[in-house]
Image (tube, helix red, strand yellow):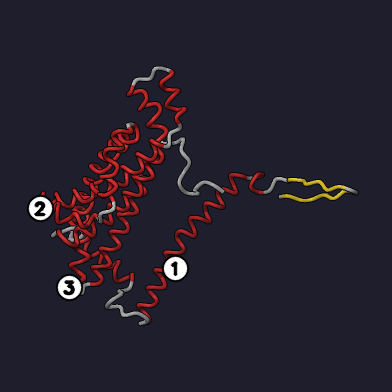
Amino acid sequence: MTTVVRTPGDSVLVRRPGPRELHPVRTHRRRRALEVSLALAVPLALVLWWQLAAVRGWVDDRVYPAPSTILADGWDRAAAGDLWPDVWATLRRVLAGYAVGTAAGYALGLLMGSLSLVRAALEPLLDAAYVVPKLALLPVFLNMFGLGEGPQVALVATTVFFFVWISTMSAVLAIPSGHRDAGQVFGASPWQMFRHVLLPASLPAVLVGARIAAGVAVLVIVASEQIAATNGLGHLIFDSRALFQNDVMFVGIVCVAVLGVVFSELVRLVGRLLTPWAPRDRGRGQS
């Protein structure tokens, strides 16, 4: 709180502590409660409006079933065991592709960020491959691996690879040269340079790229399953839409949304545990 105290011939600016300075914990809790309330209230309001519109006939409930209908159908399918095979198929492909793509992207990004000759040799080729829509590579992977899990996993791995590669290479290049010079002055070995200089300095930015890649991986696998799969949530959505089972289609969409949010938040949590020194990528905990 700032006030101006005027005296004859002069003005004095006086800074008095406000609630944020006097009660930081209480202010933070109130701000956090407001953020959580808004995060819950907005989607809840949209769901309630959708429910009301379906009940009142404002929208065709054959095309847009009420949320209560979607929830009941999802519960029945889960209880009968019909939903879990598709969820597990999608999750298995995402996890396998994400692990392969993350490992390859981080290794190559670290190498290209550290060695300029390797970067000069590979960056133009990878830049050209990056702009190719990844779904356009699905026929290539089908020719390489045939039908089954291989093309799905390869497509996710390729998509994740580029996100992690770009974020890792950029993070390594952004490390101040003074950090590297200090390690060399102290006679750090290549492993020590990686362990104590490159890894701590680049990991926060790498994990941001990995979190973005987690969400994109879910998008890609769902699109891929709609084209070339006999199970999975993408196949469930596409197949139910073709059969005009819109309630089942929305069950699949909701499952994809939940899977994407949980996966992204899990990567975010791992990032916070691995990099406690890094600033958070959201305004959480800040007032």
Measure the alpha-carbon separation of dots 1 and 3. 30 Å
Measure the alpha-carbon separation of dots 2 and 1. 47 Å
Residue 143: numbered disc: 2
Q: Position of residue 61 (x, y in %)?
A: 30, 78
Disc 1 target residue: 45
Q: Can residue 52 be seen here?
A: yes
Of the pair 271 and 20, the residue shown nearer to us: 271
Q: Position of residue 58 (x, y in %)?
A: 37, 81
In the shown orientation, is residue 175 left or right of residue 110? Answer: right
* Sequence order check, earlier mark of 1 and 3: 1
Disc 3 target residue: 243
Of the pair 201 and 60, the residue shown nearer to us: 201
Residue at the spot 19% in from the left edge and 69% down from the top edge: 240
Q: Position of residue 208 (x, y in %)?
A: 39, 45
Mark 3, other Cα within 10 Å: few <14 / some 14–19 / many ≥20: few
Q: Position of residue 157 (x, y in %)?
A: 23, 47
Mark 2, other Cα within 10 Å: few <14 / some 14–19 / many ≥20: few
Measure the alpha-carbon separation of dots 2 and 3. 29 Å
Residue at the spot 31% in from the left edge and 54% down from the top edge: 260
Which element type, helix, strand or loop, lies under badge 1? Answer: helix
Dot 1 amino acid type: Ala
Dot 2 amino acid type: Asn
